[in-house]
Amino acid sequence: MRVGVLLFCTFLTLFASPSAYNEGKKLYFSKGCNGCHGVSAGGTNIYPALAFRRKAFLVYKLTRLRAKQGDTQLSQMMIPFAMGLSDKQIDALTTFLSDYHEHTKEHYTPDNSMTGGGSS
């Protein structure tokens, strides 16, 4: 079964298109994934980060969850969300997450801080 999933993932990766990325982005927000995994799919202290994960891993996990197979109690919470996903939707979601390239808020670093004497 794992070989089949890996072949399926390879096929999807070879034929993924920009429209799959955009469709995955729409699904991520319309299905409410951002409510737990964050707006930038970076995860929280409870829920895992999904952005930049390998596509094959994400397809494997979502396919198992769609088949009502959760490894942990926390992952079993995902089953109702995954059950209604088609293969095409799983492809789109995993394309969006694995190829994540959205603009995120700039973070403070000394390189972009203002310098000065501190007096006014």
Image (spheres, grey):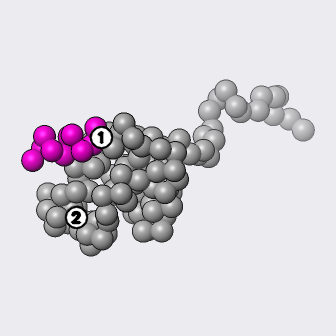
Q: Main secondary structure of the magenta part?
A: helix
C-beta proximity under 8 Å, tags 2 and 1: no
- On the image, the x and y values in percent for residue 16 come to 42, 43
Asked whether 62 falls inside the magenta stretch, the response is no
The residue to which callout 2 is attached is 66
How many marks on residues?
Answer: 2
Q: Nearer the viewer, residue 31 or 9?
A: 9
Dividing the picture into quarters, in which one does residue 99 lie? top left
Outermost residue to the left: 1
Front tag of 2 and 1: 1
Dividing the picture into quarters, in which one does residue 67 lie? bottom left
Q: How far apart are marks 2 and 1 (CA)?
A: 20 Å
Name the side, left or right, on which 13 lies relative to 29.
left
Name the side, left or right, on which 106 lies relative to 36.
right
Residue drawn at point x = 30 percent, y = 58 percent: 87
Secondary element type, mark 2: helix
Secondary element type, mark 1: helix
- On the image, the x and y values in percent for residue 15 come to 39, 41
- 84 above or below 71? below
Looking at the rendered structure, the kind of residue marked 1 is Phe
In the rendered structure, which disc, 2 or 1, sits on the residue that comes first in sequence? 1
- Quadrant where the C terminus sits is top right
- On the image, the x and y values in percent for residue 83 come to 25, 69
User: Bounds of the magenta span?
Assistant: 1-10
Residue drawn at point x = 48 percent, y = 49 percent: 21
- On the image, the x and y values in percent for residue 59 come to 27, 50
Dot 1, how many residues are within 10 Å of its Cα: few (below 14), some (14-19), or many (20+)? few
Looking at the rendered structure, the kind of residue marked 2 is Arg
- 106 above or below 19? above
User: Residue 11 has which mark?
Assistant: 1
Asked whether 6 falls inside the magenta stretch, the response is yes
